């Protein structure tokens, strides 16, 4: 082992490969430290296809807005003292709630208007999203009405949303997306106008208004109540994070970082399974010879005659899109190489004197295969496993790129699939296309370099021609 | 064992493998979750059409009869009707086949030509930059995923510098006139063919270089040199001629991976061919179409392997002369 390392260290190729591999391993292990976003579930972090934030160094993008989050809590609201409705604020862990409680008796209508001012100090965005949850608790004879408006520095009022409620319901989600065509119609804008640009004309003081009203016969103290939770205005930036955002506003850097884990895991696991099958087949074949050998080697021949990528595409499509299916499928179609190598090594080991001695002293075939053959083929097995890892990584990436990957997992292949499917090419978003592709290449290269070096050391016959 | 019996053995072997692959195909497409009928029949068909299909595929027959029918249909290239277009799969494949053959054939011949020339030069100029490039290309080919390289070419020459078409087999509508049509086809071929050449040239150059170096160290070359023949005479007259047969074998050994790779190439360049047809069929769960396309690809690969065996046997004197040799 020590001697192996001594020789390995002297190979510049092997050391380069090892360093690249260790780099990716560190990235995979410390992925949560490198990014705070979830690669799949955190959506709308920024505008679709936002550029990386460091592009600010270019004059063209210096003025581009970044994401602004306006999470409303009690302090920001100006609460006009009030007639018939009592407003209370409540904050508990992550949730901040505004409660509108009816206090007045009688008939007709009670209204209240909350307002808060905020500064937006960037250029016009293209998109904003307003979200909240509403929980009305109203008697049948009472109608509650909520409305949300934004007033821009020029004094224009945009009523973005209103909702009417009767009866009691649990938390109802409200989501206002500035790209919504209904919203454009509501604001009487042309279908080609951008609501966000119309409202946020530039930097200045904006006001967000939330109004609540109760109307009907049943006005009375404590009778009507509407809770509004987690009112959040997010103005999506056109610059975001290390590598920008994808078509859903998810963070590309976190996809790249977490993709390292998936690629490493799939590559190593597939190659491992393939090598376990291959070693078993190779030893049985080479040791037992005869019918078993003939049968197993014919099976390997047939498997080698099947075009691998097309059959993987068909099976991945039929079995369903999951990471595990890909791991197993790739293993099932790549064990033949290791099997052949192990078989020929077993053939020569079988003729060696220590195996003869063991057999003469009455050791069983199983014992000889496990105790004498297996340990002696392990170094070779290791080398062929390392060389199989890049094959598995590239097969997985190719399948994911073709749209047969796991839709629930962010992998490098999927990043490229999305890049192709959702306009990264037409927008020349090289920061979306190059990083995953280069990562696949570098990680594969690292295993090829390591594998070749290990192979050279362990298998002198195999040494590269110079 | 002479060459004749060797050919016979390989032929029988190839037929057996074909038979196994077809049987696997039968099993795979019937193993799918749910009703096996679903894999053959479009759920949107009218009851009469369904009945017709049931008869054609013998779905009411016992399994072994279904299997025989399936075999008969495949041997006639009768794959049934596509779920998505309702056209015969055979017809759809025939529409696309010439495009695939054009793309792959052209790419393969250009790769072969340039690769062999590069390899011979690398062998004749040992220690040159070209040789380093050729020996390094093996690593490159192993580590760079083909689809990424093709995406890069597309990004560079289809989008950044929009000099080549980003998709398609020809312009829509096609330009009038024979010459214009030909030029339009070539124009659309340039990017995909170039990408395939870049991906595969390394194998050819490296193989040729190694074979040339082997040949150059043979006794008869040393003799030829000693006779005072010029370097070029030795290189091209003797060494190169001796490596031609294994290169023919390599041609057939390389073909399968090029055919399999067509799925990726055709998808990226939106090429109207068999590979993309296979992927589209799988993604749309159009089973008859997927089955047909896969059958054709598998058949092509099998024939290539068979041809490689034949040329290999022809090249290997142990087999040709009949000294006997076990390939097991």
Image: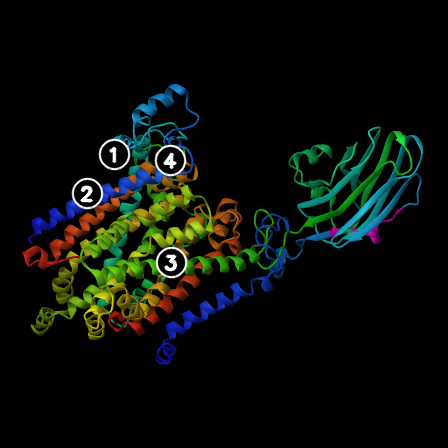
Above/below status of B281 relative to B134:
above
Pair 3/4: label in front: 3
Q: Report whether A106 appears left or right of A178.
A: right
The image shows residue A163 at horizontal and vertical percentages of 77, 34
Which span is picked out in magenta? A70-79
The image shows residue A109 at horizontal and vertical percentages of 89, 32
Same subunit, labels 1 and 3: the answer reads no
Same subunit, labels 2 and 1: the answer reads yes
Q: Report whether B221 appears left or right of A431.
A: left
Residue where numbered disc 2 is placed: B15
Q: Is residue B60 magenta?
A: no
Which residue, as the protein is rendered here, is positioned at the far front? A362
The reply to whether the C-beta atoms of the residues labelled 3 and 4 are less than 8 Å apart is no
Residue where numbered disc 4 is placed: B287
Q: Earlier in the sequence, mark 2 or mark 4?
A: 2
Q: Which chain contains the residue that carries disc 4?
A: B
Q: Earlier in the sequence, mark 2 or mark 1?
A: 2
Dot 2 falls on a residue whose secondary structure is helix
The image shows residue B81 at horizontal and vertical percentages of 35, 29
Residue B206 seen in render: no
Task: Indicate which disc residue A273 carries.
Answer: 3
Measure the C-alpha gap from mark 3 to mark 2: 30 Å
Residue where numbered disc 1 is placed: B71
Residue B273 picture quarter:
top left
Q: Which chain contains the residue that carries disc 3?
A: A
Q: Report whether A436 appears left or right of B239.
A: right
Q: How is the image coloured?
A: rainbow
């Amino acid at each position: 082992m020590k001697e192996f390392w001594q020789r390995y260290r002297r190979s510049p190729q092997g050391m380069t490969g090892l360093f690249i591999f260790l780099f990716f391993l560190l990235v995979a292990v410390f992925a949560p430290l490198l990014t705070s976003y979830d690669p799949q579930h955190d959506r709308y972090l920024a505008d679709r296809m936002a550029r990386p934030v460091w592009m600010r160094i270019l004059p063209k993008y210096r003025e581009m807005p970044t994401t602004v989050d306006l999470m409303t809590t009690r302090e920001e609201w100006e609460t006009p003292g009030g007639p018939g409705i009592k407003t209370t604020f409540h904050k508990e862990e992550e949730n901040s709630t505004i409660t509108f409680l009816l206090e007045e008796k009688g008939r007709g209508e009670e209204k209240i208007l909350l307002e808060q001012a905020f500064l937006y100090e960037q250029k016009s965005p293209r998109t904003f999203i307003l979200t909240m949850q509403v929980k009305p608790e109203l008697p049948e004879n009472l109608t509650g009405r909520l409305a949300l408006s934004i007033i821009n520095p020029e004094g224009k009022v945009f009523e973005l949303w209103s909702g009417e409620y009767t009866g009691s319901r649990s938390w109802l989600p409200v989501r206002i997306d500035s790209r919504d065509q209904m919203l454009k119609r509501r604001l009487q804008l042309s279908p080609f106008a951008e609501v966000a640009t119309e409202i946020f004309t530039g930097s200045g003081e904006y006001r967000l208004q939330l109004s609540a009203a109760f109307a009907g016969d049943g006005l009375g103290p404590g009778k009507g109540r509407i809770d509004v939770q987690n009112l959040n205005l997010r103005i999506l930036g056109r610059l975001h994070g290390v590598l920008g955002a994808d078509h859903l506003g998810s963070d590309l850097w976190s996809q790249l970082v977490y993709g390292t884990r998936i690629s490493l895991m799939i590559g190593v696991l597939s190659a491992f399974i393939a090598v376990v099958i291959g070693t078993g087949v190779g030893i049985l074949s080479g040791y037992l010879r005869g019918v078993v050998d003939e049968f197993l080697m014919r099976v390997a021949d047939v498997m080698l005659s099947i075009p691998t990528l097309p059959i993987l595409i068909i099976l991945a499509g039929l079995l369903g899109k999951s990471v595990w299916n890909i791991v197993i499928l790739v293993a099932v179609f790549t064990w033949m190489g290791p099997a052949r190598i192990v078989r020929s090594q077993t053939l020569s080991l079988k003729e060696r004197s220590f195996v003869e001695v063991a057999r003469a002293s009455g050791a069983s075939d199983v014992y000889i295969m496990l105790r004498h053959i297996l340990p002696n083929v392990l170094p070779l097995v290791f080398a062929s496993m390392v060389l199989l890892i890049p094959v598995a990584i590239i097969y997985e990436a190719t399948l994911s790129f073709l749209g047969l990957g796991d839709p629930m997992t962010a992998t490098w292949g999927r990043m490229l699939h999305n890049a192709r499917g959702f306009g990264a090419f037409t927008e020349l978003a090289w920061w979306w296309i190059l990083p995953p592709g280069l990562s696949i290449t570098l990680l594969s290269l690292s295993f090829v370099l390591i594998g070749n070096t290990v192979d050279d050391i362990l298998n002198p016959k195999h040494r590269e021609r110079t | 064992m002479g060459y004749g019996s060797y050919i016979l053995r390989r032929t029988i072997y190839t037929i057996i493998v074909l038979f196994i692959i077809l049987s696997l195909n039968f099993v795979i497409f019937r193993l799918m979750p749910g009703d096996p009928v679903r894999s053959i029949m479009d759920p949107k068909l009218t009851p009469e059409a369904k009945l017709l299909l049931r008869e054609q595929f013998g779905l009411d027959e016992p399994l072994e009869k279904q299997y025989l029918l399936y075999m008969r249909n495949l041997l006639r290239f009768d794959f049934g009707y596509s779920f998505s277009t309702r056209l015969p799969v055979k017809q759809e494949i025939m529409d696309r086949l010439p495009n695939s053959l054009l793309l792959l054939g052209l790419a393969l011949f250009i790769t072969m030509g340039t690769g062999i020339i590069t390899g011979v030069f690398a062998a004749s100029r040992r220690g040159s930059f070209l040789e380093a490039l050729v020996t390094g290309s093996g690593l490159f080919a192993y580590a760079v995923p083909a689809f990424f390289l093709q995406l890069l070419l597309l990004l560079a020459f289809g989008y950044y510098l929009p000099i080549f078409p980003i998709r398609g087999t020809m312009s829509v509508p096609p330009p009038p006139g024979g010459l214009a049509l030909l030029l339009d086809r070539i124009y659309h071929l340039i990017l995909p063919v170039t990408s395939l050449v870049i991906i595969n040239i390394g194998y050819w150059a490296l193989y040729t270089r190694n074979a040339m170096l082997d040949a150059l160290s043979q006794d008869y070359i040393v003799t030829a040199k000693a006779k005072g023949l010029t370097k070029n005479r030795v290189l091209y007259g003797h060494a190169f001629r001796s490596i031609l047969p294994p290169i023919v074998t390599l041609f057939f050994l390389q073909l399968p991976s090029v055919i399999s790779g067509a799925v990726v190439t055709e998808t990226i360049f939106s090429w109207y061919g068999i590979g993309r047809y296979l992927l589209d069929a799988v993604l749309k769960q159009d089973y008859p179409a997927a089955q047909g396309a896969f059958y054709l690809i598998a058949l092509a690969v099998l024939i290539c392997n068979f041809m490689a065996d034949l040329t290999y046997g022809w090249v290997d004197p142990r087999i040709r002369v009949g000294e006997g040799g076990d390939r097991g």
